Amino acid sequence: MSPALEARTRCVDPTARVFVDAEVVTAEATKQVKSDWAAADNTSGADAGTATGTQTSTTLQDTGKSWTTNQWAGHRVRIVAGTGAGQDRTVLSNTGATLTVTVAWGTTPVSGSSIYVLDPPLLLDDGGVRLAA
């Protein structure tokens, strides 16, 4: 069993008499994944850049980008340097130059100082937690 997963649990649906095996992801596993991200090369994501333009509590804008609409939906965005460093959020949607995140930033990124990296979304499979290819 993957060390990122705590245990295999048998769930029972008494009305349908169905048994389902499920693996439970622990808070410790989540911390480990975040730690692995922090230890990784800060420029090794699917895309990276510097926040420019107007930033809000739920957006990150890079006016130098021309992304396809919703190209990054479901991916993770990490602030790796500057104001807000250490935060990561899931991208809800994006326009050509703006990412909208699912949960507000604790510290809003600052135009010109916040460096970000976009990572693939997390997937769970029988091997544990992994980044999507």
Image (cartoon, grey):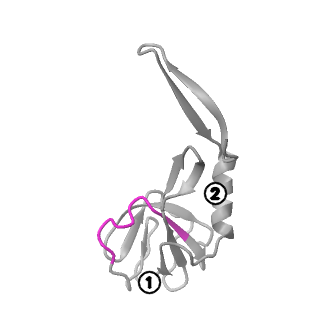
Count neighbours of disc 1 (C-alpha within 10 A) and say few if under 14, some if 14 to 19, many if 20 or more: many
> Seen from this angle, which residue lies furthest left?
69
Find the distance from the CA under tag 2 to the CA under tag 1.
28 Å
Residue at image point 56% right, 68% down: 107
Q: Main secondary structure of the magenta part?
A: loop
Viewer-closest of 25 and 103: 25
In the drawing, does residue 85 fall left or right of residue 63? Answer: right
Residue 20 placed where, x, y %?
51, 26
- What kind of residue is marked 1? Thr
- What kind of residue is marked 2? Val
* Marker count (numbered): 2
Viewer-closest of 19 and 69: 19
Viewer-closest of 75 and 7: 7
Residue 73 included in the magenta stretch of the image = yes
Residue with the mark numbered 1: 52
Q: Which residues are magenta?
A: 67-78
Mark 2 secondary-structure assignment: helix
The image quadrant of residue 16 is top left
- Give me the disc on residue 33: 2
Mark 1 secondary-structure assignment: loop
Residue 21 placed where, x, y %?
55, 29
Asked whether the viewer can see residue 104, the reply is no
Residue at image point 64% right, 60% down: 34
Residue at image point 32% right, 80% down: 66
The image quadrant of residue 88 is bottom right
Q: Quadrant of the N terminus?
A: top right
